[in-house]
Image (cartoon, coloured by chain):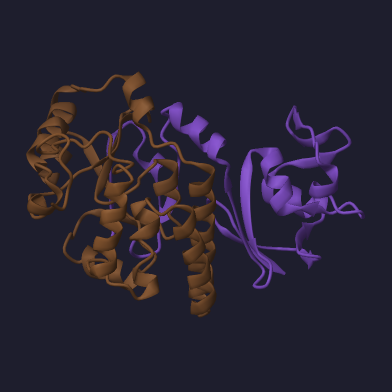
Chain colours: A purple, B brown
Amino acid sequence: MATVINDTQHLEVEATISDDRWLMSPGAFEALTGWTLKPEGMCREDVCAPIYRAQEVLSPDGMVDLVEAAPVIGMTAVADLARGVAALGASASARAESMTTLQAPAFTLPDMSGNPVSLHDFDRHKVLLLAWSSW
Amino acid sequence: MQEELAEQGLTIIAVAIDSDLEAVREWAAHAPGLTIVIDRDYTVAEQYGIVNVPATVWIDENGRIVRPADTAMADDRFRAFAHVDSSVHHAQLRAWVNDGVLDLDEATVAELMERPSPELQQARLHRRIAVELHDRGDVEAAREHLASAVELAPNDWVIRRGSMPMNDIDPFGEKFFEFVGEWMEAGSPGYRLATGREYPGDRPHE
């Protein structure tokens, strides 16, 4: 088992780390990202993104390379192969695109007692996000 | 001010861009009654383009961002250092909450959103890995990833200064001032709105 950190959680996933690659079965990749490997490319709902560099994105036995496949679906991944921890987030262009819509991104984060608080809890309110830190 | 604006229907969510829960707890004790959430992986910082703290983002009743991330001081404690007059922001906030007055149109807000570079996105992912490894007790491995993050995004305050505690570096110490110097050399990126900034064109820390 290995750990993938995405925008919302830390997930235990099935991954094979070999030949300097973080490989996942198409099923595990789909469970993680929502994208399905099909002959026409990586597909979600009625959108398919073609895979131009199949040798990098897929291993000879059909496993998906997380770091190479991420850009195909508008994401970026960084993997620490030695420690079995990877992080998966939006690509710079996908993030920039979502920012310019000015739709406030939904989030759910724990409060001081560990209870989840969502931006949606305050729908129909004016909200001031106040970012701060101890550093 | 918080109570006054709450009466007018404003909800304040304080987002701690911080992976150190104990440190957050100590700070939170000074603000009883405030809704505080903890963004250990800096995902809200990323989604809203927050490049430094303290900063505010305004979201209207329809879930639209009407004012982008901007330095905002609760008071003038840091005025001599940051050269920000907090009363300007406070006046704007009151005008929005009480009368719905906004001084930035949508196009300007969109333009001012801090779009990340590919390097900054990579840096943010390295930082997430660092937090996970630090939690596991692998401090050395965590520091490797923090170093990669800083190398990729040397001028992002949240990445650079925010990783100092995990590196046992004093975030108010020598390394911090070294960073501020480099950041200014680079043209003070990420501070385009700078509400209440005194002496336009002036640089903080001079």
B68 to B15, vertically: above or below: above
Q: Is residue A124 visible?
A: yes
Q: Is residue A135 visible?
A: no
> Looking at the image, which residue is at 9% across and 37% down?
B199
> Looking at the image, which residue is at 39% across and 73% down?
B167
**Between residues B126 and B136, which one lies in front from this camera angle?**
B126
Q: Residue furthest front?
A: B185
In this picture, residue B206 sits left or right of residue A35: left
- Residue A59 lies, in percent from the top left, at 86, 54
In this picture, residue A19 sits left or right of residue B52: right
In this picture, residue B144 sits left or right of residue B107: right
Q: Quadrant of the C terminus of chain A?
A: bottom left
B197 to A3, vertically: above or below: above
> Looking at the image, which residue is at 67% across and 69% down?
A84
B1 to A86, vertically: above or below: above
> Looking at the image, which residue is at 27% across and 48% down?
B184
Number of marks drawn: 0
- Residue B71 lies, in percent from the top left, at 23, 43
